Amino acid sequence: MPYTSQEEQIEALSQEIQALPVSVSQIFSQVNGEAQKRFIDVENYLLWLQDALEISRSSFRAWEATAEYFRATIEILNNIDKQEEFALWAEGGKRLCSTSAPIAASYFKSSEAFLNEHNMNDLKQWINAGESLYHGTWKSGALATKFFETSPSLLLEFTIERLLQYVAILDSVAGNSSEMAEECLLLARESFSLVEKESTEGYLKLLSSTVNNNWKYTKDTQRSAALALPRIARHERARYMDLAAKMADERGKRYLIFLNEGSKSFGEVTYDVHTKMLDMFENLYSISPEAAVEFVHSCPEIIRRVGISNIDKWYESGLPMLQQNEAAGLGFFRLESARGESLIDQISATVNLEDIAPILQMYARGLTGGDMQLRSVTELKERTLGWAREEKASTDGSNIFLPDEISSFPTKNENFSWFKVLCSHQTGHLEFMSFNFDFEKEGNVFGIKRVVTEAAKLETDEDSVALVLSEFERFFDLFPQRKLSSDIYQALEDARIDHLTRQSYAGLRDPYRLVQGAATMGRPSPQNLPLREALVELLIRMTLLERDATIPVPRNLRSVVNNMAATLDKLMDLNALPEDTAEACLIIYKLLIKVPNTPPPTDMDWDETQIGELSEDGTSEIQEADSASVGGQDMVPGSGTEDDVEYKPAEDVDYRGDFKPELVQTLANLRKGQQQTDEMTKSPPLTEEMIKQLLEKSAEIDLSSVVDGNIDDPSGLFISSLMSESIEGPDAEFKDESGPGGIGKEEVESEEELAEQPQTSLYSEWDFVALDYKPNWCRIHESVIAEGSIDFYQETVDKYAGLINEVRRQFEMMVPETYRKEKRLPDGEEFDLDAAIEYVVEKRAGAAPDEKIYWRRNKTQRDVAVIFLLDMSASTAEAIDEKELKALNDDDDDVPEDPKQYLYWLKSRREKANRSYRRIIDLEKESTVLLIRALETIGDTYGIYGFSGYGRDNVEFYTVKDLEEPFSDKVQRRIDGINPLHATRMGPAIRHAAEKLDSVEAKTKVLFLISDGRPQDRGYSREGAEKEYAVQDTHMALLETKSKGIIPFLLTVDRAGHDYMKEMCGDLPYEVLADINLLPKRLPQLYSRLTL
Amino acid sequence: MPQKSNSSVVDTNSEPYHAYEVEEFTIDEEPYYLPIQDEIEVFTAAYEQKIPVLLKGPTGCGKTRFVEYMAWRLGKPMSTVRKGNKQNPDVQGKPLITIASHEDLTASDLVGRFLLDGEQTRWVDGPLTRAVKAGAICYLDEVVEARKDTTVLIHPLTDHRRLLPVEKRGQIIEAADGFLLVISYNPGYQSALKDLKQSTRQRFIAMEFEYPPREQEAAIVQKESGVDKKNADLLARLAEKVRNLKEHGLQEGVSTRLLIYAGNLISKGISPRRACEAAVAQALSDDPSVQRSINEIITSIFE
Ligand SMILES: Nc1ncnc2c1ncn2[C@@H]1O[C@H](COP(=O)(O)OP(=O)(O)OP(=O)(O)O)[C@@H](O)[C@H]1O
Ligand SMILES: [Mg+2]
């Protein structure tokens, strides 16, 4: 109507609307006034009226839709950005109305809720989705209506894209049964609310698989899958849905069992086995789907019976059964097979190191008094310190290595006893000082012949005057046949340890008997060995068997065996020392070296003889008169031994494991030497010459494997770690990138304020020379730290189980203290009866009574918020124990010729392959885990952040856990993401953390900073006052923190910290930790004290 | 064994309104005490010079027993003191007043208070006042637990003045000649906030007590519990091992006191393993894995 004025048009349209049925016109009147005001543009208002009329005319049942249109108007206006969009909204309604008025009504009614969360683009898709459900039938109309009604709430659970997918599924279901589709839709909200975002995709895929294969199960699947998901470990949910979908594609109804019963089984076991279970399930499924389902069903029971760590073993025994014979396999996995049962019994008797390591570690610490670590032998290969070749127990003086499991005996108790004996033997070496051998010290039982033996050797052999790395090396240098001496020494020293252990620990005698008895089984028979080896074997047997047991003794060597037995007997003395073992070794060596190592003549006579009898006719005295002793002749084989075969080292005794005294002592000496370099007394560093010597001589290292460059070989690893011990500290080579002198001088800083940028915060910096702040000087970039593996968290928890318990208890005790009664108050809840009576009595006595006679329940509930701020500077990459080497070039193709270079190369290559030394940051991380455990028990609000950065424009601030964020898997993974980065600009990081604390409500607030050195960064200095500037700014930042009512606390693991901490912290509390290894323990302690 | 002599014991049941922990002994018979180092000489010298003494050390290591012994010994004319001397039955030991501190212990608890007596009031001396007047040894156990206002009393008593202010009565009491204040304190489980103030600390000479070395501890356990020598030796050995676990899962090592309990159980016919489980493993920790570790040590040491 272009010819009439807008007013006239409005008038006309309004009248038309007023003429509509009263249910419509009434609402119109209600909103019209407001609408007129709200439409800024008259055009739009006009359009509003026109659209209303158009809707009302679109079908004869459109009145309700029109009413809804009016009713929604104001809210829609509130929800849209531009008023032009209103027409778009109306447009959609008009279109719907032209197909079905009730659908349009439902659309108008729900769109406000929709637009609350979504924009106009989404609206189009939403309308299309609803429209797609309508196929002209009454039923499909009802479904579309329902869709508009329920979908806004569904959209709270997932995205619009997912909604479209779901609509497609519903539409296919509706193609078969509208009722089913409607039921699904009705249940959708409830189901989807159980499915979190990450799993929605898999969930929808499963639903569409179901629809494609058997739509009748759609509703069941929708519900069962939703209920199943929370039972599955989060990281496996997608796979679980995939598997179910795959099953749904293939076979009838089995996947529903998998969803229902199967997920319940998963729910019964801990999350950490889910991955394994699903792996196994998948594997079994490819062989027999039925068996796979049975497997899942049996898992909880199996885990209960054999333990998580043993489920593999059970599974691996069933698998081949299933492969050969499906019925047998089915029975196995259904737990209906006799063979399966006995297997389970056997497995459940197995003792795994994993399960008992914490107990035995503590046991070992008790027995030795040292800070022993109990480790698995398999870890040996992965460690820098190569050690034993085989899977044998051993110790390097601070670690005890034990096998992963023991299953040789039918009961758990016996297997455990075995473990205990293994462990006690290793602790015995430490308790009875196997490694404290001193060449020149006299033992308690034997004399000291080795000194004269050495003198005799030096007479003839001039060039053997060499530096030695250990007392043991000096001792073993006496023996031309080193392997023989090493075998004898090991047998005797092990015997001494066993004897002392059995004597001092009466309770171990029985298990020892069991283990020692079993140890002789499977050993080579002496009758089949060359003679000298046969005698060594007899010696070993004598050390294992009881006195009334018998061994075969070659008749013509009876006196040698007798003397050997007598010597051994003498050594079995409570006062015997390793020095005595050495003497005994010397005696027996001299006996054996004279025996030719020839294969035993077939006609040789062997007499089974009781061990107890042997020593009676023997002597431990060496025949001094023997002329051969002059010039060391008694140390080499006699003449007439041409048909000698080469001496082969004796087989180790299983439970005694590997014993390498020479290496342990060498290592210990090198470590000591290392420490001394810090002081005035510098011990000579390990020379190339010495290493070569050690390589060539020691019977404990297999030289060939090192020369072959086999870096996986433990001996090779050992050599390389020897090298690293001997190399001077890393200080000379390995420098913090941000080290003083490096950065800070080179570039001239621009002197400008920084500009604002989104997602960053600016902070001023204190310039102590100018005595003023540099405004907006530093920029903090805050981000959530990248996630690492979740394993780190769990491993740390396992590793520190004991300490965690202790800390937790310590923290638990902090809580109740806050509910104490406070007495002797001038005012309070009630009279303290005691005090009141006292008051009255004193008043009567005429004394000046104390008026503090009230008490009050101390309502000070614990209300603490704390931020832990971790230094993530490059220097935290520094190794704690082992000195790190400067990394060599990446292209180390050419192997160095020079042995020393070669060893460097070996080590660095290995390190690159597997960095296994512990770094400062690792301890920071571990401490964080411990703290979290503790903090979770007392419920303090806490945040964990890391900081580093490079230059003032780039101070990085990483969130590990935000203050208000609940603890979660994500946080666990983020802890592992903590890594050494760049520099340490403490000031801004402190200010930013303080800002965060300032924004939360808490009675006590603490900012806890953990660092490994002084603050430093590019440009964090001033000419002439490089270090001072950073220290002063940090000091100021701490003071600012304090003035916000926050207690700042600085903990440094930098032992040089005393130099600057006092200045940096002033009166504020701080601590310099003398030994970084104490960090995990000390941190919770300090925290509890600070906040008590 | 120490005897409570009725005359000097406060009957806590008849206290009309406030029960506080007070023990007061005169020790008539020589308490068994095995000297570990030179503690007897040092303490005697301090006593003669009227220097207050601070005893530090873990729980159950013999501090209380030591003070009891010293009270007995110092009560004798010096010439008659010889070990095991019982020829002088008339001579009584010094009175010893022991006060266990707790967080509600107030100055009045120590000094004394007015009591109602019919329509009248009557002043009753507190244990500290009695000790000051009688020239007794006053042993304040776990002193850091006491309320702050008690330090007000301790300060003038422990410097050259040796005065006890009795504020309520407007009096100042000069300590009698033989009076000596001995306090104890276990640095192990005190929080930073509860630490002794330097101004208090530096009024005492300090003597550090440790658990006795193995052989002596075995002798003590044998004597005190009546267990046989072999088991006493093993108990001392066990103690050594378990104490290695301090800070490795245990807050405190096992005390001599607990070892004596274990010995008591054994001499009553309980098997050594079981006795140690109850008196050591279970007594020390609630953590099953720690208990298990200790039990493994026990089963290694005892048959
Ligand atoms: N040197 C010793 N001579 C004799 N008995 C001792 C000795 N050391 C400890 N004991 C024994 O140990 C028991 C515990 O010692 P005591 O009660 O003196 O410990 P404490 O150090 O006072 O402990 P707490 O700090 O818990 O009060 C004593 O009853 C006594 O039997
Ligand atoms: Mg005591």
Image: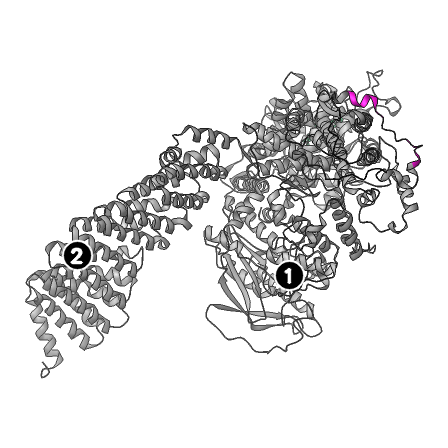
Q: What's the CA distance linking mark 1 and mark 2?
A: 65 Å
- Judged from the image, the secondary structure of the residue bearing numbered disc 2 is helix
Residue at numbered disc 1: A875
Left or right for A400, reference A123: right
| Residue A735 in the figure: left or right of residue A6 | right
Q: Quadrant of residue A801?
A: top right
Chain name for mark 2 = A
> Is A449 colored magenta in this rendering?
no
Asked if disc 1 and disc 2 are in contact, CB closer than 8 Å, the reply is no
Q: Dot 1, how many residues are within 10 Å of its Cα: few (below 14), some (14-19), or many (20+)?
A: many
Residue named by callout 2 = A145
| Label 1 residue SS | helix
Q: Position of residue A412 (x, y in %)?
A: 54, 29
Residue A615 in the magenta stretch? The answer is yes
Percent x, y for residue A168? 23, 58
Magenta residues span A613-627
Q: Chain of mark 1?
A: A
Q: Residues within 10 Å of mark 2 (few under 14, many from 20)?
A: many
Residue A600 located left or right of residue A320 = right
Q: Is residue B169 visible?
A: no
Asked if residue A986 is positioned above or below residue A143 in the image, the reply reads below
Asked if the residue at label 2 sits under 8 Å from ligand 1, the reply is no
Up the image or down, B3 lies above or below A752; here it is above
Task: Please tell me which residue lies in front, A290 or B9.
Answer: A290
Res. A747 visible in picture: yes
Q: Majority secondary structure of the magenta segment?
A: loop
- Tell me the mark number nearer the camera, choosing from 1 and 2: 1
User: Quadrant of the image for the N terminus of chain A?
Assistant: bottom left
Find ligand 1 in the image and state its quadrant.
top right
Q: Amino acid at mark 1?
A: Ser
